[in-house]
Image: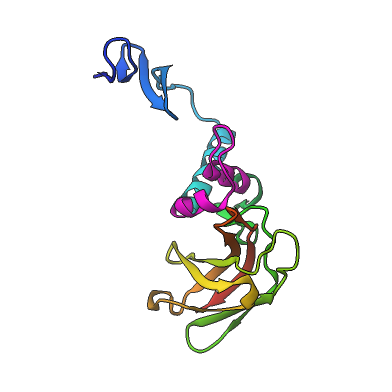
């Protein structure tokens, strides 16, 4: 059943005959109703679907974050679209058992701020990691008050966590204390700087894998 939103001459949502009405980015759109294909899926098509599914499943938990850290809307492309495009091209690889993410190429932020310079991660105390870096705030597009953002992923748990810290670029160090659900797990770390005043993010860096 279709619903008219602004009377008989306005836009509508739903299906009427062979057309479907919807609202897309504030515009009323009419399109042909999709037809179920009877054509068998080729091996290349299935491979592309599997690749897309792998990347989408990995990035979906990060969608809200990537909306803020992966650039701005460009035409009809959103930051999440940009993230999907990058990871489809650069950060997924095929193995004998299917596709998997190349963690060292994953990005959790992309932008014009200067990134971390010479980052170093060291285990300290039980279940904690300490990140240090060099203060490069004298460089262009690097500010002393840029805030560190760390993203953690535990593959065995299929779980992400964020450390939106109070650590600034000029402090050159940050201690990460993990929740007990991560104890004993191998985690992958990525870090970037953000600056809300200039609405910019640095292109993130992969910091490696560590057992918590």
Q: Position of residue 1 (x, y in %)?
A: 24, 19
Magenta extent: 61-87
105 left or right of 147 in image: right
* Percent x, y of residue 18: 36, 12
Residue at figure coordinates x 43%, y 75% from the top left: 182
**From this viewpoint, which residue is outermost toward the right?**
139
Q: Number of callouts in the render? A: 0
User: Secondary structure of the magenta portion, mostly?
Assistant: helix
Towards the viewer: 168 or 49: 168
**Residue 48 appears in view:** yes
Q: Is residue 15 above or below residue 162?
A: above
- Foreground pick, 27 / 15: 27
Location of residue 168 (image quadrant): bottom right
**Any magenta on residue 62?**
yes
Q: Where is residue 178 shown, x and y percent of the image? A: 45, 77
Is residue 70 found inside the magenta-colored segment of the image?
Answer: yes
What's the residue at 52%, 51% (across, down)? 68
Write the residue at 48% across / 55% down: 65
Instruction: Give the left or right position of residue 144, taking residue 7 as reference.
Output: right
Asked which colour scheme the image uses, the reply is rainbow
Residue 2 placed where, x, y %?
Answer: 26, 18
């Amino acid at each position: 059943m279709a619903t008219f939103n602004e009377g008989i001459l306005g836009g509508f949502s739903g299906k009427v005959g062979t057309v479907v009405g919807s609202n897309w980015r504030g515009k009323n759109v009419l399109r042909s109703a999709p037809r179920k294909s009877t054509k068998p899926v080729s091996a290349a098509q299935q491979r592309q679907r599997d690749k897309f599914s792998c990347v989408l499943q990995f990035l979906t938990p990060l969608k809200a974050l990537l909306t803020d850290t992966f650039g701005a809307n460009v035409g009809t492309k959103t930051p999440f679209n940009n993230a999907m495009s990058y990871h489809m091209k650069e950060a997924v690889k095929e193995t004998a058992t299917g596709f998997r993410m190349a963690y060292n190429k994953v990005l959790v932020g992309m932008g014009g701020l200067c990134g971390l310079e010479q980052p170093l991660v060291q285990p300290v105390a039980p279940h904690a990691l300490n990140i240090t870096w060099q203060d490069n705030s004298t460089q262009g597009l690097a500010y002393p008050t840029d805030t560190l953002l760390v993203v953690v992923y535990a593959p065995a748990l299929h779980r992400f966590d964020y450390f939106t810290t109070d650590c600034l670029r000029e402090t050159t160090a940050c201690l990460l204390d993990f929740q007990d659900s991560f104890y004993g797990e191998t985690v992958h770390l990525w870090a970037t700087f953000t600056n809300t005043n200039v609405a910019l993010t640095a292109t993130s860096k992969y910091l490696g894998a560590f057992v918590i």
